[in-house]
Amino acid sequence: MGNQKRARHNHWLRNINRKRAMSGEKNEKAILGYIELLKKQEKYGETRWIKNAFEKAETKLKKYGIKKDSVSSVLEKKGLNHLIK
């Protein structure tokens, strides 16, 4: 342990399981966020803010391995077929 602060190592003695689950609903929230952007695009049109938000949302979908088919299936379930591109 040497010259380090004791607080860094105190948890070894008390609580072994400190980490929480990190990946809970990421995929669902990524899809729902993309759908919200589609709704906003329909309402407000193609704005610069929406363009930038779409780039980020599509990057997130790609990162999580979510394909457009799964997004379109969720749109169909919600009855938003007119938003499918």
Image (spheres, rainbow, N blue to C red):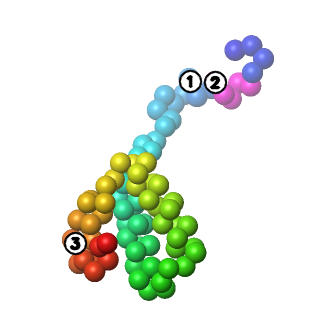
Rounded to the nearest angstrom, the CA distance separating label 3 from label 2 is: 51 Å
Residue that numbered label 1 is attached to: 12
Look at the image and give the residue range highlighted in magenta.
Answer: 5-9
Gap in angstroms between the C-alphas marked 1 and 2: 6 Å
Q: Are marks 1 and 2 in contact (CB under 8 Å)?
A: yes
Query: Which class describes the residues within 10 Å of circle 2: few (<14), some (14-19), or many (20+)?
Result: few
Quadrant housing residue 81: bottom left
Where is residue 22 shown, x and y percent of the image?
Answer: 45, 45
Query: Residue 83, percent across and down?
Result: 32, 77
Contact between labelled residues 1 and 3, with CB atoms less than 8 Å apart: no
Task: Work out whether 18 lies above or below 44.
Answer: above
Relative horizontal placement of residue 81, taking residue 60 as reference (left or right): left
Residue 7 spot, x, y in % from top left:
68, 29
Percent coordinates x, y for residue 21 in the rendering: 42, 43
> Residue at coordinates 26% horizontally, 59% vertically from top-left?
70
| Location of the C terminus (image quadrant) | bottom left
Closer mark to the observer between disc 3 and disc 2: 3
Disc 2 element: helix
Q: Which image quarter: residue 67?
A: bottom left
Q: Amino acid under label 2?
A: His
56 and 6: which is toward the camera = 56
- Residue lying farthest bottom? 43
Dot 1, crowdedness within 10 Å: few (<14), some or many (≥20)? few
What residue did someone put label 3 on?
Answer: 76
Q: Which residue is mark 2?
A: 9
As drawn, 21 above or below 51: above
Residue at screen point 40% across, 60% down: 29
Q: Residues within 10 Å of mark 3 (few under 14, many from 20)?
A: some
